[in-house]
Each structure stands twice: as structure tokens, then as C-alpha cells.
Amino acid sequence: MKKIKFYRCSECGNILTATGEAEISCCGRKLNQLIANKCDPEHELKVEEIDDEHYISMQHEMSKEHYIAFVA
């Protein structure tokens, strides 16, 4: 899992993964690897276990100006 690299096409929104070095393209454009961001206290995830299931949630406004595009 530590070796997985994520790529996202800005044209179509396609999300691709690779486990090694790769040159990935989509919609005719070369994609750069996404850089992971640390979670700040304002966007901290809440994990609950209910009936042997894990529920993950967070407080977020989800407006047009401030939204989550991708979570891994």
C-alpha cells in the first residue's frame, strides 16, 4: 500500500493508480503523481465501528468553493 501512486486527469476526472514508476497519460496529457496532504484539525476524519462495519465521516461544508475532489 505504501508504494501506490495516484494520478488524476484534470480534463475528465479519471483516477488512475500505479504501484511502480510509470508515465501515465489520459486525454492526451501526461499526468503528474498526486501529492498526499496531511489532514488539518478542521478536516479530521471520525471513524466509528458499528455492527462490525467501519463508518468514516467528517464535518465539511461541501460548497462550490470548498469541496473534496478525491480521498484515498
Image (cartoon, grey):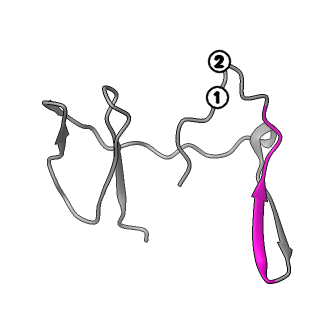
50 vs 15, left or right, is: right
The residue that appears at 72% across and 41% down in the rendered structure is 40
Which SS class for mark 2? loop
Badge count: 2
Which quarter shows the N terminus? Answer: bottom left
* Magenta-colored stretch includes residue 49: no
Q: Residues within 10 Å of mark 2 (few under 14, many from 20)?
A: few
x and y percentages locating residue 69 in the rendered image: 54, 35
Q: Which residues are magenta?
A: 52-60
Q: Quadrant of residue 54?
A: bottom right
Which residue is under mark 2? 64
34 vs 23, left or right, is: right
x and y percentages locating residue 18 in the rendered image: 27, 60
Q: Quadrant of residue 32?
A: top left
Q: Nearer the viewer, residue 5 or 8?
A: 8
* Residues under numbered marks 2 and 1 in contact, where contact means CB atoms less than 8 Å apart: yes
Q: Nearer the viewer, residue 4 or 38?
A: 4
Q: Quadrant of residue 53?
A: bottom right
Q: Residue furthest bottom?
A: 52
The residue that appears at 86% across and 75% down in the rendered structure is 50
The residue that appears at 67% across and 22% down in the rendered structure is 66
Which SS class for mark 1? loop
Which residue is under mark 1? 67
Q: Label 2, label 1: how many angstroms apart (C-alpha)?
A: 6 Å
Res. 14 mark: none
Q: Amino acid at mark 2?
A: Lys
The answer to whether residue 63 is above or below residue 48 is above
The answer to whether residue 29 is above or below residue 50 is above
The residue that appears at 39% across and 42% down in the rendered structure is 34
Q: Residues within 10 Å of mark 1 (few under 14, many from 20)?
A: few
Q: Residue furthest top?
A: 65
Q: Amino acid at mark 1?
A: Tyr
